[in-house]
Each structure stands twice: as C-alpha cells, then as structure tokens.
Image: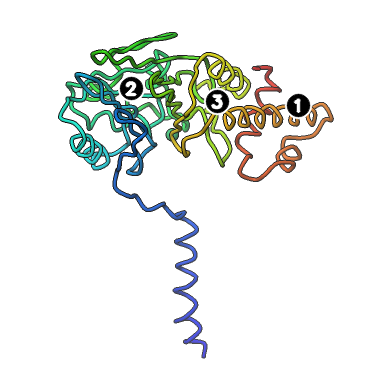
Amino acid sequence: MKKNFIIIFIPFYLMLLVSLSFPQQREVLPVRLEKISERLFEILEGRGARGGVYIGDNGVLVIDAKMNKSSVDQTIAEIEKITDKPIKYLVNTHSDGDHIWGNQYFPQTITFIAHENCRKELFHPRRDGTPSEWNKPELMPFMPSITFRDKMDIYLGSKKVELWYFGVGHTTGDAVVYFPEEKTAFLGDQIFWGRPQLIHSYKGGNSFEHVKTLTKMLETLDAEKYCSGHSEILDRQAIRKHIGEMKARQEKVKSLIEKNKTLEEIKAEFNENESRLIEGIYDEIRLNIH
Ligand SMILES: [Zn+2]
C-alpha cells in the first residue's frame, strides 16, 4: 500500500513542483501579419511583442523587432510574401527586449531608428543591476543609429510616417509611430489593456507622467486605431478609459497615504496583479516625483 502511494503520489508531487517553478509559457505561434490597410499590417505572434509593417512607395518600414532569430526570420519571410520592396527602416518603440532584442537578427543594411532616450536606456544596467548586454561592441551596428527628440517624419516616396514623442511614461523613450492616411498609431507598451500598465521606474518611467503623455498624445493625433505591443487594437475611448483608471488608482493611493496606511495595507486594497504598479505609484507620491 505504502509502495503504491509512493509510485502514484511522488511523480504527481514532482510534476506539481516543476509546474510551480516554471510558470506555464504560452505556446509560441508562427509570426503572421494582420492587415490594417493595403499598406499597413500588424505583426502578431512569434517571440516578442506585437509590431507593425508599412509598405511605402520605395521601401518598407518595420515597427519593433521581436526577440529571437526564428521570429525575425519568420517576420522577414512574411513581409517578402506581400512585397518585393526592401526593408529600409526599423523603428523601435522603446528599449524593452521584447521590442528591440531582435534588431541583431535583421540585416545590418537596415537603418534602426528610435527616440534618443531609448538609445540611452540601452546602456543602462538591467533591472537586477547587471550591465546591459548592449554594451557588447558586436551589437553596436544594431542599435538605433538615428534618434529623434520631439518629432521626425520619414518619407517612403510619397508616403509619410510620423514619429512622435509625447513624454515620459512606460519608459523615458517611448515613440509613437503614426500613419496619417490610416489614422493609426503604434504605441508600443504605452498602453496595456486587460492587465495593469507596466511602468519601468528603474528606467525612469513614471505613472503620473504616463497620464500626461497619453493625454497629450490624444490631443495631438487624430488617430482612430491604437496598436499596442501586447493588446488588441484599441480605440480612443479605450485610451481615455485607461487614463481614467490610472488617475483613479493614483487618487486612491494618495488618499490612503494621507490616512497613514502602510504600503502593504494599500496594496491589499487593490487586485493582487496590480501590486507592482501600486508600489510604483506609492514610491512616486512618497518621493514626490509626480
Ligand atoms: Zn513589451
């Protein structure tokens, strides 16, 4: 009896341990393109964030780079199925690995472009304090070689692509890539939908600035569609809702601090998956960086 117990339950216990120590990784599906217009596509699946492809008159612009060779190879193969025009530009929306690590698997002939703060962030130590991988000289050709500060226009023949910077938020260097004809903006990770917003305070990100930055973006761009690195395409109403929810969290944290609640007590007032965001808001208020 005891032997049976061991035979049946030990493997079960081991399986449980293994599954707890390695959280279920989502199955990686092959990269595919989803049409927004005749020229504009979202890049879905593969390893890394969602990105975009724009086919201009004389070349292609890619938004964000996935994060391993096979996903980049698949992206390039998918682009070659819809156009024979060369990939000229790759715009990184920000410095997170799931948007930029794949740069190194694209041909060196491509011009990599990002906000100036995104390039600076690449040299910063990682969250755990270890040096950035981007300090390796062999990665230099794949870093953004052209950077912009407030706005930059890229012409692909007669077609214009606008790069905008509206301020600090998720990081300090988040670019918005806007396609006026399609009224579509690619926001990178400046909006998370259905899960709490990530604010990388270790990179200088700030939730209060995030609210200002997104508000400025809504006031400036006439976009109807907003593509995100990790969500379905959103509309203006969703962006407004996201801003409102962030403001409500900030107000609630502020009022709980005024009532002398501890961080743990404050976190307990929110959903468990919001802990990191709430801790960030708490620090911003306590350190008066808002
Ligand atoms: Zn991301």
**In the displayed structure, does residue 96 sit left or right of residue 71?**
right
Whether 272 is drawn above or below 1: the answer is: above
Distance from the alpha carbon under mark 3 to that under mark 2: 23 Å
Q: Position of residue 40 (x, y in %)?
A: 33, 29
Whether 9 is drawn above or below 128: the answer is: below
**Element at label 2:** strand
- Ligand 1 resides in the quarter of the picture at top left
The residue identified by callout 2 is 91
Measuring 52% from the left and 20% from the top, which residue is drawn there? 204
Q: Earlier in the sequence, mark 3 or mark 2?
A: 2
Q: Nearer the viewer, mark 3 or mark 1?
A: 1
Distance from the alpha carbon under mark 3 to that under mark 1: 18 Å
Measuring 36% from the left and 39% from the top, which residue is drawn there? 48
Q: Which mark is residue 201?
A: 3
In the current view of this chain or complex, which residue is farthest to the bottom?
1
In which quadrant of the rendered view does residue 279 lie? top right
> Cβ–Cβ below 8 Å for labels 3 and 1?
no
**In the displayed structure, does residue 287 sit left or right of residue 91?**
right
Whether 288 is drawn above or below 266: the answer is: above
**Disc 2, ligand 1: is the CB inside 8 Å?**
no
Quadrant location, the C terminus: top right
- CA neighbours of label 3 inside 10 A, class few (<14), some (14 to 19), many (20+): some
In which quadrant of the rendered view does residue 104 lie? top left
**Element at label 1:** helix
Q: Nearer the viewer, residue 158 or 279?
A: 158
Residue type, numbered disc 3: Ser
Whether 108 is drawn above or below 245: the answer is: above
Q: Position of residue 73 (x, y in %)?
A: 21, 39
Q: Nearer the viewer, residue 113 or 154?
A: 154
The residue identified by callout 1 is 254
In which quadrant of the rendered view does residue 254 lie? top right
